[in-house]
Structures are given as structure tokens and as C-alpha cells.
Image (cartoon, grey):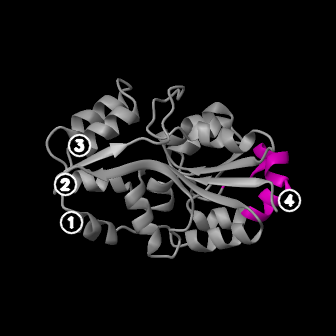
Amino acid sequence: MSDWTLLCDFDGTISLEDTTDTLLERFGKVGWEELETEWREGRIGSHDCMAGQVALLDMSLAELDAHLAARAVDPAFADFVRTAQAQGMHVEVVSDGLDYAIRKILARDGLDHLPITSNRLEPAGERNWRLAFPNASAKCAAASGTCKCARAARYQNPPRKRVLLIGDGASDFCVAEAADFVFAKGKLIAHCVAKNIPHAPIHGFADALALLPALVSGKLVAAPRAVPTLPNAVSA
């Protein structure tokens, strides 16, 4: 068995777009954008932002399912999971998004068996919804709905596993600093550079799959700053 645990963000990492954002753009009532601004400006955490935004969704279950059926995932993700698991790695989805959406989307590729740590979407009426936070923490520095740092710490405590984070955005900033190594895309690349976090920039899971042998052999962690920059890597 490998001593690596792989924690994968969902929205913008496994999925090609932020699923919650697409739901709000399609079904959100007036007010969700103001909450988004408050979160981006640091006045509220994602816990309060997401709770308020989900309460503003106006959609039936059928409309939700139809919308999720059109959401795409990284085409290399399934191969990445199979390869990592074949090498004894634990692969887990850790997201500040919606569990129902994640599981529904992953089911299309037969990947809904993966453990998912996320916020819980619950019906609150025929067209109303609420969000529960089974993975929140009062100690979460980012005031997130799902404390990704707490999840990483679970594996890093004895018997210790090394944690690889695969992510793309602000919800991954804190846990990137706690991880043993990061495969970073999007805004997370610039954060890793600014904080001197050992990482490899990726465009998607095809790149992550190509980097797995170097991770397993210890080449990446042993010399993180020597990781070659992928061509046309996203820098912001």
C-alpha cells in the first residue's frame, strides 16, 4: 500500500466548471451575487456565503438533475483514479461544494463510490433548499463550510500518511500549506509560488497522471523546486 493519500477538490478541478456557480447563475434569486462579493472581499467565510446562496436557489429536483446531467468532468480523471488506486493510494474528493451534485456527476463515470467530504444539500420544500455542514470546524481559519485542513490532518496524524492535494482555487489555499505536496491549477499555482509551497503546476488530470510516477518515487517531494514547469501553465 502507498503511503500517499490524495485529496482532490471538485469544482474547477475534477469538474470543468464551478457547479455551484452554474446553479446560482441558472436558478439563483436576487441577492446571491452580493453574498459572493462579501465572501470575495473577506467579510464572510464560505460557510455563511454558501448557506445564504443555497437558500436563494429556486429549482425543483428534476431541474437540478437535468442541470447536473450537463456538467462535465476532466476526461482524464477516471484514468487517474484507477491508476492511483492500483498503486495503493487512497483517493478522496474533498470539496466546499454540494455533496448531491458531486455524487450525481461522478456517477456517470462510475466514480460515485469514491469517498466524498463536502457540504450536504438538503431539500427544504418543493423548490427550496438548505445546506448542512457536517464537515465544518470552529477552528477553521478560513471559516469554510468544509474544513479541508481538518481532513488532511486526519491522515497526517499517526499512523501518518503523506497528503497530496489536487486543487485550483481559494478553497484550497489553506490546505495547500498543510499538504505534503500539491498538484496545482488555476489560482492555486500563484498561491503556491507566493507561499513557497512544494507543488507542480498542472492543466488537468492528464498532467497529474503523468506526474504520479515521480510522486511515488519521491522525486517531486525530494526536490520540489526542481519540478519542470509545464508549457503554458496557468499563472493566476
**Which numbered disc, 2 or 1, marks the residue that appears first in the sequence?**
2
Q: Residue at x 39, y 26 (%)?
A: 42
Q: Which residue is mark 4?
A: 217
Label 3 packing within 10 angstroms: few (<14), some (14-19), many (20+): some
Q: Are marks 3 and 1 in contact (CB under 8 Å)?
A: no
> In the depicted view, which residue is nearer to us: 189 or 1?
1
- Mark 4 → mark 3, Cα distance in angstroms: 47 Å
Q: Residue 108: percent from the left, percent from the top? A: 44, 76
Q: In front: 111, or 36?
A: 111
Span highlighted in magenta in the image: 212-229
Instruction: Work out which residue is located at the far left of the displayed protein and give it.
Output: 30
- Dot in front, 2 or 3: 3
Q: Are discs 4 and 3 less than 8 Å apart at CB?
A: no
Q: Residue at x 16, y 52 (%)?
A: 58
Three-letter residue code for mark 2: Phe
Asked if the residue at tag 1 contacts the one at tag 2, i.e. Cβ–Cβ closer than 8 Å, the answer is yes
> On screen, 66 above or below 163?
below
Task: Indicate which label's residue lies in the foreground, 4 or 3.
Answer: 3
Which disc, if any, is residue 63?
1
Q: Secondary structure at mark 2?
A: helix
Given the image, on which type of amino acid does mark 4 rest?
A: Ser
Q: Earlier in the sequence, mark 4 or mark 2?
A: 2
| SS assignment at label 4 | helix
- The number of callouts visible is 4
Residue 100 part of the magenta-drawn span: no
Label 2 belongs to which residue? 27
Can residue 96 be seen here? Answer: no
232 relative position to 122: left or right: right
